[in-house]
Image (cartoon, helix red, strand yellow):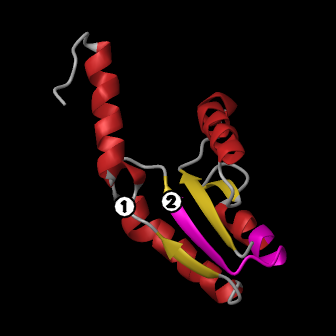
Amino acid sequence: MTYSLILLAHGSSDPAWRAPFERFHASLAARMQAPLKLAYMELSEPSLESSVAELAAAGIRRAEILPLFFAAGRHLRKDVPAQVEALRSSHPGIELELLPPVGEHPAFIDALAAVIAEQAGEALPT
């Protein structure tokens, strides 16, 4: 396999904060054929840098980075693109693409709306 998807979360020094992301990653990785990595932008390991280095060493030629963020704030407009550019320089053998944050995907919006409606005891119109 020459492709991988990296799920990118913000990161936290609190292991309890990371636990839902780790459970989500494990559940999703068991259902997908493509290699799936979980990485953190800061404060946690595995970092985006160590994840890309590991993929490059394994011969992965292309990786897409899917931010697990609701919206593209400062981190996704400035910090993460700068990280990705630095990684492109240090790992020229792997093509890296930064995708829009998951929160902007219509299916995510629909799923979140369904959860909120369920919590409110309402059914969404279909």
Disc 2 packing (10 Å; few <14; some 14–19; many ≥20): some
The residue tagged with tag 1: helix, strand or loop?
helix
Is residue 41 visible in the rendered image? The answer is no
* Viewer-nearest of discs 1 and 2: 2
User: In the picture, residue 25 is in which quadrant?
Assistant: top right
Q: Residue 92: within the magenta?
A: no
Please name whichever residue, 96 or 18, is drawn nearer the observer in this view of the structure: 96
Quick check: marks 1 and 2 in contact, CB under 8 Å?
no
Q: Mark 1 points at which residue?
A: 74
Instruction: Kindly identify the amino acid type of the residue bearing the numbered disc 1.
Output: Arg
Q: Residue 73: x and y, percent?
A: 34, 57
Residue 107 to residue 86: above or below? above
Q: Residue 57: x and y, percent?
A: 83, 76
Please name whichever residue, 11 or 22, is drawn nearer the observer in this view of the structure: 22
Is residue 88 visible in the rendered image? The answer is yes
Q: Which mark is residue 66?
A: 2
Please name whichever residue, 15 or 109, is drawn nearer the observer in this view of the structure: 109
Quarter the N terminus occupies: bottom right
Query: What's the residue at 51%, 75% (across, down)?
Result: 97
Q: Which residue lies furthest to the front in this view?
A: 126
Stretch of the chain drawn in magenta: 54-66
